Amino acid sequence: MRKLRLRKIASTIFAFCVWAAAIVSPTKTKFTSLVRFDGTNGSSPYYESLVQGTDGNLYGTTTYGGASEQNCYGDSCGTVFKITPAGALTTLHQFDFTDGGLPEAGLVQTTDGDFYGAAAIGGSSGSGTIFKITPAGKLTTLYEFQNSTDGANPLGALVQARSGFFYGTTSYGGGYCACGTVFKVTSAGTLTTLHTFVGGGSEGNYPEAGLVQGTDGNFYGTTAYGGANGYGTIFKITPAGTLTTLHNFDVTDGANPWAGLVQGTDGNLYGTTIYGGSNSGCGAFGCGTVFKITPAGTLTTLHNFDGTDGGFPTGRLAQATDGNFYGMTGSYGANDGGTIFKITTAGTLTTLHNFDVAHGVNPLGGLAQATNGTFYGTASGGGIDNDGTVFSLSAGLGAFVETLPTSGKVGAKVIILGTDLTGATNVTFNGAAATFTVVRKSEITTTVPAGATTGKVDVTTPKGTLKSDVVFRVTR
């Protein structure tokens, strides 16, 4: 539990030297501060990325804040919020410890319209919870962790697998060294522990981030510590729970991967380490790295941060519709408050924004590209009383559509998210026409048509044809 308390302190330290900094905006991008948290409506959005709902709004969590009692280390226990693309914020739920507290991870929306997430502490044993919340704000606790038997402190976001089950990690608990677990949980709250990290050797321990399901059906993740060299690992785990260590970090190629992985369109996995690398501009342990790794375990360091271009990246990368990856560093940069960057698959990095205290500092999470092409994210500090902000960044990318889920059998229900779908006349799955219903301007419901094969989903609207950001995989 000590690590959770130190995180808020670390965010304050990162922000200390940036109080009088000026905002710097590069050309061809537009940064907009949408919300400045004030404590009562939330505080300190940490390692989460916002998620776009079927209604076109964005949903997320704050680790602290809210108007409830000071039940979480002398602070309020955090919130779930909704924000419109224009910046109107609604607090949907305020945790009070009995139903969870300190929700550091983001949310995932399913085809039933509800969101699922995890709280790092709270519940009957204080070890954290898994919850479901409706877009209107009705929260249901699905599972309460019991520490020694099934894990504690889930810090990463859940991922819904193609099977419909949710998979996730706990950063502590699970018996022996209490080094964390990988679990599977149903939408009704039945949990199965798939793997318990035992510490020592090459296995790694303390998985801080969530998992990603690869195109091969396996899950990929990171441990923040441990492994053969003590600096964390990358692992693969089957849906049944067989774990394979793919890489042991050794500082020169990075150290302490706190963020989860993302699978690129090229089939490789991409991620960041908070420390390590070849530059010492941020201290003896380095400024962190961006890397790619093949599913077989061959790792390539794409970029070593040096402080001038940021340092300490803790959030998950996002591959945008232009094929590049976008991410953030938690500190350093021109104003010492962190940066937003773009990096190509070959490793060419461009700094897009340097954070300052007025508009937010220390962005610890990842970016989310909404279907209007704009990126949205959070900063854990800055703004009013250093409570953090929500912002948008336009990088000149066009609109697209997104499918929920991203795979399914012929006949399976699929929701298509977009920005202006009113008047749509045609929906195809890799060229196969589908019947559909326009529910609202941000949502189409359809089913996978007969004859569909794996490929992009196209939606024809009066303003043109919108393509899905990733291929839809037709399963058998």
Image (cartoon, rainbow, N blue to C red):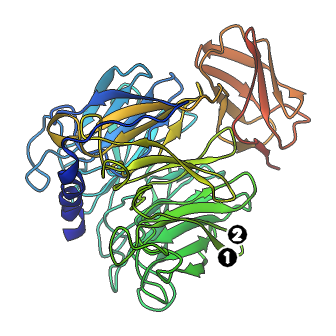
Residue at image x 18%, y 36%?
A: 66
The residue depicted at 66 percent of the width and 27 percent of the height is 416
Q: Could you say where residue 169 lies in the image, as x and y percent from the top left?
A: 44, 64
The residue that mark 1 highlights is: 297
Quadrant placement of the N terminus: bottom left
Circle 2 residues within 10 Å: few <14, some 14–19, many ≥20: some
The answer to whether residue 264 is seen in the rendering is: yes
Badge 1: few (under 14), some or many (20 or more) residues near its Cα, within 10 Å? some
Question: Which element is circle 1 on?
Answer: loop
The answer to whether residue 126 is visible is no
**Which amino acid type is shown beneath numbered disc 1?**
Gly
Q: Which residue is mark 2?
A: 294
In the displayed structure image, the side of residue 363 where residue 306 appears, left or right: right
Q: Residue at x 29, y 39 (%)?
A: 360
Q: Nearer the viewer, residue 202 or 315?
A: 315
In the foreground, 82 or 94: 82
Specify the farthest residue to the right: 451
Count all numbered tags in the image, as a single digit. Answer: 2
The one nearer the camera, 476 or 360, is 360
Q: Which mark is residue 468?
A: none
Q: Residue furthest bottom?
A: 201
When the figure is inspected, residue 143 is found, relative to residue 367, above or below; the finding is below
Using residue 1 as the reference point, say whether residue 191 is left or right of it. Answer: right
Q: Quadrant of residue 279?
A: bottom left
Residue 87 image point, x, y percent: 36, 22
Q: Percent from the top left, x then y, of residue 302?
A: 61, 65
**Where is residue 353 shown, x and y percent of the image?**
44, 41
Q: Amino acid at mark 2?
A: Thr
Q: Nearer the viewer, residue 355 or 203?
A: 355
Callout 2: SS: loop
Q: Are marks 2 and 1 in contact (CB under 8 Å)?
A: yes
Choose top left, top right, bottom left or bottom right for residue 8.
Answer: bottom left
